[in-house]
Image: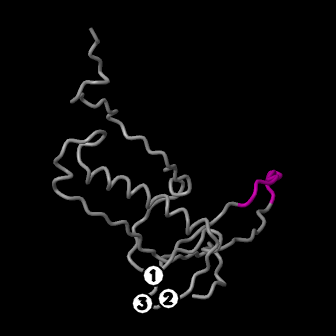
């Protein structure tokens, strides 16, 4: 008599991992290394400063203090860029049972936010000069290499 095996069996339950592996990199080292700040204008500015290099600073007791040169801060600026990632999820997609996520909307939102963080590195690391744009042209961030250059045409 032939043995009935799982190869002939119909209606077997699937065995699917409840984890979703993202095979594309989502590391955002540049984005993670900068601080976030809310801005209230299309152009925002900030100041930088630096300390003088360490030097021999030994003085004789009772010596007169000598004058030193002071340096002002440096004003930098950049343009606010509008990033957008849109998606539509049907209500049914959020209700049906799925593997690796409770709600499709939450999963897709998290994925799109990671993509925006990754996208943020592109304008900062690419050499891009600032220019005034028409209302119909999207504003773009200036690269980190040029955002401090005050001679850029505004």
Residue for point 56% across, 86% down: 131
Q: Residues within 10 Å of mark 3 (few under 14, many from 20)?
A: few
Answer left or right for 60 relative to 2: right
**Marker disc for residue 1:** none
Q: CA distance from mark 1 to mark 3?
A: 7 Å
Element type at marker 1? loop
Q: On the image, numbered disc 3 is attached to which residue?
A: 135
Check contact, mark 1 vs mark 3: CB within 8 A: no
Check contact, mark 2 vs mark 1: CB within 8 A: yes
Q: Residues within 10 Å of mark 1 (few under 14, many from 20)?
A: few
Residue for point 29% across, 21% down: 6
Residue for point 61% across, 65% down: 125
Check contact, mark 3 vs mark 2: CB within 8 A: yes
Q: Position of residue 144 (x, y in %)?
A: 61, 68
Q: On the image, numbered disc 1 is attached to which residue?
A: 138
Element type at marker 2? loop
Residue 35's place in the image compared with 132, above or below, is: above
Q: On the image, numbered disc 2 is attached to which residue?
A: 133
In terms of secondary structure, what is the magenta stretch mainly? loop
* Residue at the outermost top position: 1
Q: Earlier in the sequence, mark 2 or mark 1?
A: 2
Q: Is residue 113 magenta?
A: no
């Amino acid at each position: 008599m032939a043995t009935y095996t799982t190869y002939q069996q119909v209606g077997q339950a699937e065995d699917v991992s409840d984890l979703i592996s993202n095979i594309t990199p989502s590391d955002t080292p540049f984005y993670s290394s900068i601080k976030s700040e809310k801005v209230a204008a299309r152009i925002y500015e900030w100041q930088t400063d630096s300390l003088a290099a360490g030097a021999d600073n030994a003085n004789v007791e009772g010596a007169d203090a000598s004058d030193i040169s002071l340096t002002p801060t440096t004003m930098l600026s950049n343009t606010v860029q509008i990033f957008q990632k849109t998606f539509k999820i049907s209500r049914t997609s959020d209700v049906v049972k799925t593997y690796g996520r409770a709600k499709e909307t939450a999963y897709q939102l998290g994925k799109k936010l990671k993509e925006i963080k990754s996208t943020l590195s592109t304008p900062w690391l690419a050499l891009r000069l600032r220019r005034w744009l028409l209302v119909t042209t999207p504003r773009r961030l200036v690269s980190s290499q040029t955002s401090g250059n005050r001679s850029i045409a505004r």
